[in-house]
Amino acid sequence: MSYQCPSCGKSNFQDHSAVARHMSQPRSGCNSWLEDLINLCSASVRATSMDMDHEPNIPDLNLDVDPELDGPVFGHPSWDEEFQGDSGEGDSQVNELTDSGFIDWYPEPPQTYSRGYTFLDLFHSDENSVYRVTNHYYPLSGRKEWEVASWLLCSGLAKIDSFLSLEMIKSLPLSFSSAKELRSRAETLPSGPRWLSQVIPTVHPTKSPVILYWCDPLECIASILNHPFFHDRIDFTPRRVYTTAQRLCRVYSEWMTADDAWNMQSALPRGATLLGTILSSDKTNISMMMGDRVAHPLLISLANIHMSTQLKSSSNTFVLTALLLKKCMQGVLEDRLIHKCLNIVLRPLKQAAREGVMLSDPLRVIRTRADPNDIEAFFREAQRFRLNGVSEPFFEDWVLSEPSHFLTPETLHHIHREFYDHDVKWLVCAVGDAELDFRFSVLQPVTGFRHFHGGITKLKQVTGHAQCDIQRSIIAVSADVVPSAVITAIRALMDFRYLVQSPRIDDVDLKRISAALKVFHANKDSILAGGFRRGQCSAIELMQSIVPSIRNSGVIMQWTADTTEHAHITKIKDLAHSSNNHDYDSQICSKQQVDTDHGDAVNDDVDFDVDDNHDIPAELLATIGCPGHSRPITNHFAIAKLLQYREVGTVPVPLRSFSVRRTSFHLAYAPSIRNISVDDAALKFGLPDLRPAITDFLGREAVHGQDFVHTIGGARRARPTAPLSFEKLQVWFKFRLQDTDFHDVSIIRLAQTLNCSPPSDIWTCSRYDPVIINNDAKCAWPIDGLRGHTVGEIRLIMHPVGKAGTNWSWKDCFLAYVYHFDFVPQGRSDRELSMQLHVLKQAMRSNDTRVGDIVPVTQLRAPVNLVPRFGASVDHCLTPYNSMEHSSEFWLNKYWDKNTFLPLSMY
């Protein structure tokens, strides 16, 4: 039987091993290695310092950049010599105070040496490196030819030859004239991890050989560790973080802050370096429209990489190390086959763990009453102990491996999928399909968020994003119609989910997580009693392991499958779609070789420090990357700071972008209404007291000064016909508000559009959005929660246009007219008991008009979501465009945004 490589077309290979050896050649190495070389030669490591205690991620306008700084060099210690040299992170300093808290570093950190090798050292050690001194693009003539070659190498040999045979192309001064010649030049470049193959024997005959393709996982780990992109994004020293100097409250975030890393490091010899590996495996469909083509990739990464980098799909922290078998086997046979493949692929890692820690294997005694080779009998016996019947699990001889520790919970399946499979089904049974769908359909749409116009019960192909969108509103939507004990149980589960998804969790948070789970278990019988449960709830049992997992391995957010699911697209699906739809595994391995050569980890002309936003001038920082968003996020903080330093007369006043503490604002250059009188604006927006409200505002300013923090409410002092120092307004129908992450002020969040538009064809009752408003200068959002803050509805955003020659304090600022909401007391608590949500109602004056006032836009803090309190049955006259205006009471929905969940949950 003759084997053929479907990627390049070469044939007459004797066996699959020959195909694997052929695939290990760098198919398009010139595209990757030369690109990295050029970037490294031209890139400079910028350094700057800034105070991150009180400001978000705003760049310094006067950067002191030294282009001659060299990056750190990572090497491997020599175990044959005494442990000498510089220590890693932490050094001899055990106790340290940082922005994130008080840190105890591991007392004996890893030792680092300067005799290691770097990415460029490997490249320069090639026999052809002498030619690259004068030509970085060797074996090609120059950059232009390299661009052509890198594009051609993404195609098959026949297509390359066809392209090169064109008369116009022949006239180009290319140094190669055929695909074979181009391929041979690419194969002269150094290779990355080599692809291997092995036939897996089976007990029963199969139609075709069972072939496993894989790379040495140690080589994959080495390629990640040695890559220059991660030079300042990896932790090597375990640490314990505390909130106070007394070390009473522990904080968990990265893997290196948890107990497992500390305990494993203590088991290593003095000076050894601990590297944690992340393995991710899940089947993925690679056929489109029709067919049943499936791949089963095994991805590997380093747990030492910073969580913020790990969660970015663009960082390419995961490397494809194997394509597991996907033969149609059933039950225990499939499980055993997968474990056998994993045992083969991961053998180098297990050997490194044994030799690295210098520990003898513990005595293992297997006691069984059934022969493992008798699959049926052994499987029946294993089921009695709730085991899957695999007699030789891949981790049995892996030193320091404990399944209950390394099999960590994962948010995509254990949190979001579990919610949709159980909680949603319970509430659908309790509320009813039609009723629940209608309640979702009449919620007021929020700009930038999904609105379920047709409800949620008939959704198809519900993704993780859709499950998160349902979580935002389903608790408040289901209120008053579901029995109290049932909604208490489901609400407790929702609290549990939101708490465990935090990127930073301390001991106090762990107590709240455990308490939420206890509330669920105390009320879960009501779900059974009401007949709302459908199917088993085995996934909920896994929730009991989350708190121990956080203590052992850090927050579960860093183990999310979102990143690896996206990696399936770039590592598997994109490559499979360019194949000939046969022998996917071998073709994927061939095309993947460029990745193992560091090819896809960087793009053309990319600075490896591009994510360090404080190293970039503000002019270049209008947008920043953010995990989970395909498009960059506009940094209005940076824009606002830049505008402050512009010369007078070069930018419009008032500034359209400005910031206060952890909140930035942005308004369009052109107002929605350029010129309107105060009385006409009052009529258009339905604000009969607009003129006296402005008069009272100016009166308070005159008495207390411009820095006075205004409150909403109180008696109206001015007359309806009170004179003003201006008669015209500029009006905006919407603006953008941007804030920072609750746990990390340096993380800029996506800006939210807030609307305050008058009645229109669709929005017959107008469109106004609620917002958190500061009314106490001593309190700060979000660290103080609702203390010193209130909830209001934006009715008008305006800029007064002063009379000619009139000088007044608010000529360069924006004002907002907001309606006030009152908090409805709930007995002895400020929250409804079963829902644990605040209840709000429209604040009314004695003359039955709503309470409203003028405040500076700078007193607005964050968007907030209100859900109408529908009661036991919803009014079917409601629509998405009038539900807010026709409702009298509202739920303050803390589940709408995870960033406001904790501030709104504070007591």
Image (cartoon, helix red, strand yellow):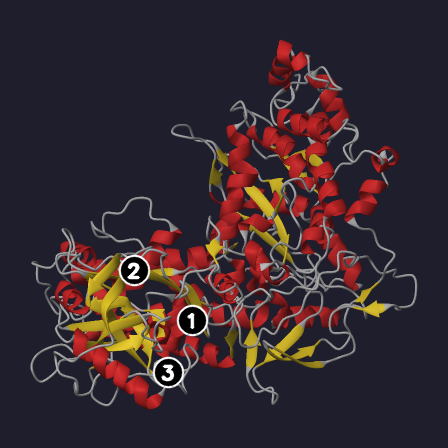
Q: Residue sitting at 46 percent across and 58 percent down?
A: 384
Residue 299 percent coordinates (x, y) = 59, 47
The quadrant of the rendering that contains the N terminus is top right
Residue position for label 3 = 706
Give the secondary structure at mark 3.
Answer: loop
Residue 858 percent coordinates (x, y) = 37, 74
Looking at the rendered image, the disc whose residue lies closer to the viewer, 1 or 3, is 3
Q: Amino acid at mark 1?
A: Leu
Q: Residue sitting at 53 percent across and 73 percent down?
A: 55
Give the secondary structure at mark 2.
Answer: strand
**Left or right relative to 545: residue 618:** right
Residue 851 percent coordinates (x, y) = 17, 79
Quadrant housing residue 15 = top right
Farthest residue toward the right?
Answer: 81
Which is nearer the N-term, disc 3 or disc 2?
3
Residue position for label 1 = 499
